Amino acid sequence: GLIGIMEAARSHFDGHGFERTSVDAIAADAGVSKMTIYSHFASKEGLFEAVIRDRTDRVVGGLAGTEALDPAQPRKALLAIGGQFLTLAREEATLGQFRSVYGAAGTQREACRAFYRQGADRLISDLAAYLHRADAAGTLNIRHPRQAADLFLSMFLGDGHIRGLLMLDMPDAREDRALLREALRVFMAAYAKAP
């Protein structure tokens, strides 16, 4: 069924990148016909988009509806969101996706659009919506929520991320925790409502 298709698709996209993945191979692995895949997802790009969405789901989506996203407690919320995002950004599957999509940027416009829509654009928008709520609650002072969301997430895409993309030594868990704490401190110094 659908879960089998998604699992097979994830494993093929992770292992081979978007361009070299074949829908035939995904169908064979999932034990369904190619037509079944196309009845659920309009295209290979559509399937890829669903896989990316699934992956970014847990950053803010996984926290939605929990008290972790209380606009009255932005420090706690940003610690949770930042932690989830950093974990996602450090995963080899995510780094592989970046590498493969960047490599295909000239030829695979739709795949790149899908990756952007369900990756960066979605995460920035979700975080911006939370920041807007915190601003309304008076706990943060944020004039441009999307810009502030972009700045917060960007703090996790620096040196460690670049090293990961290049398959060099990555920061360890202790360094990542220190980065998360410092990013939070910098963000709150800029945007916390003065008491």
Image (spheres, rainbow, N blue to C red):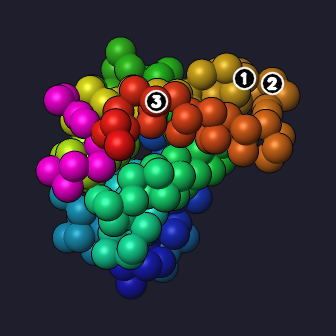
SS under mark 2:
loop
Label 3 packing within 10 angstroms: few (<14), some (14-19), many (20+): few
First in residue order: circle 1 vs circle 2: 1
> Which residue is found at the position 39% from the left and 59% from the top?
73
Tag of residue 163:
1
Q: Amino acid at mark 3?
A: Ala
Q: Is residue 122 something one can see in this rendering?
A: no
Mark 1 and mark 2 in contact? Answer it, CB < 8 Å: yes
| Crowding near the residue tagged with mark 1, few <14, some 14–19, many ≥20 C-alpha atoms within 10 Å | some
User: Of residues 169 and 127, which is closer to you in this image?
Assistant: 127
Identify the residue at horizontal 15%, vertical 50% (top origin).
136
Q: Nearer the viewer, residue 149 or 57?
A: 149
Tell me the kind of residue under disc 2: Leu
Prevalent SS, magenta region = loop
From this view, report whether residue 2 is shown above or below residue 187. Answer: below
Outermost residue toward the front in this view = 195
